[in-house]
Amino acid sequence: MKANIFIFIIFLSLPLSVFSQGKNATTNEQISRAKEIIENARKETGADKFVSNLDSFQLTIKSVGDIEGTEWITTKEASVMLPDKIFSVYSTKKPFESNAISIWNGQKYKKLFESVTFNGQRLVKDVTNQDLSSNFTNLVKDKETLEKIKRVRAIDPKVRMNDELWSEIFPLILTHPFESQAEFKFVGQAKSADRTANVVDTISANGREIRLLFDSETHHLLMMIEKYKGFDGEYETKYYYSDRELTDNILIPKKIKVEHKYTQTGKEAKITYKYLEVAEFKINPKFKSNLFDIN
């Protein structure tokens, strides 16, 4: 099933007043309605068959974007076994070639950084307790941007991974594997000339505001908006979902347009775009027994 990305743009300019009709309901009614909306979406995509018996998943996402005028091409591969095992590989193809490998096994954590030198030599370092920001010094000349990278990389890696799963896995199976008890509330409907979206809000465990827009007829997730305040300003990211295909028995969006707005305190907002492609997605795959080993 295909969907053109331009269809979702209609919701960008909608004022907050369009959501007001849901505010007259009681909290219990809002929660009940949100549960119904999400359950309908899961049934439509087939995700309802796996939510209650989700043991593991595997996901590969390719990304193309621009940072400070430099093209970045990256791939992220995540293998997750519930409740507490993650193997993640973040590969950069442009502007340089590198791999960052992160492994969680319960409370244990390890990170390796693999890079290629100018003479083609491949180097692997254990950087579990190191700051990798120096890798960007020669690529990012703007001091403010470099400082931002340093502070972002100082965030607990498990916290960062948990946040990323909201944008990476939730749109596919409509549940967060580590926040399955998240509370959702129906806040109303957003309307355009030919489409109505049911709007559902939640707050992640790390305090990020998340707004979900579901098509009232197809029940598909059209768009997600994520907002949070950082140490130096406000962040807002909008995700637009399209090109749905049946993958491992679940109808998932294969293409995602991402619009990221960063408003530094006292300065004008900066907007950047990137485009994601879900290259691989598997539910309850079998992993090698030593995949999550940490030596």
Image (tube, grey):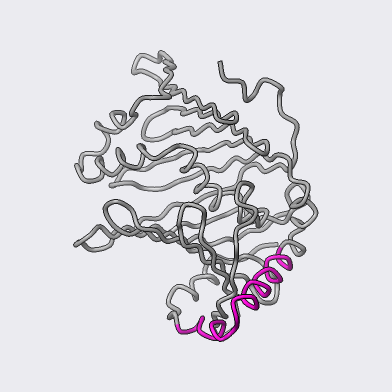
The vertical placement of 249 against 17, above or below, is: above
Q: Position of residue 259 (x, y in %)?
A: 42, 59
Residue drawn at x 62%, y 76% is: 30
The vertical placement of 283 against 27, above or below, is: above
Residue drawn at x 36%, y 34% is: 95
The quadrant in which the C terminus is found is: top right
Residue drawn at x 34%, y 29% is: 132
Q: Position of residue 180 (x, y in %)?
A: 65, 53
Q: Position of residue 162 (x, y in %)?
A: 52, 45
Front-most of 78 and 127? 127
Residue drawn at x 56%, y 66% is: 212
Q: Quadrant of residue 188?
A: bottom right
Q: Relative to 218, is 62 on the left or the right? A: left
Residue 4 falls within the magenta-colored stretch: no
Front-most of 90 and 242? 90
Query: What is the magenta range?
Result: 17-41
State whether the magenta stretch is mostly helix, strand or loop.
helix
Front-most of 114 and 120? 114
Q: Position of residue 235 (x, y in %)?
A: 36, 58
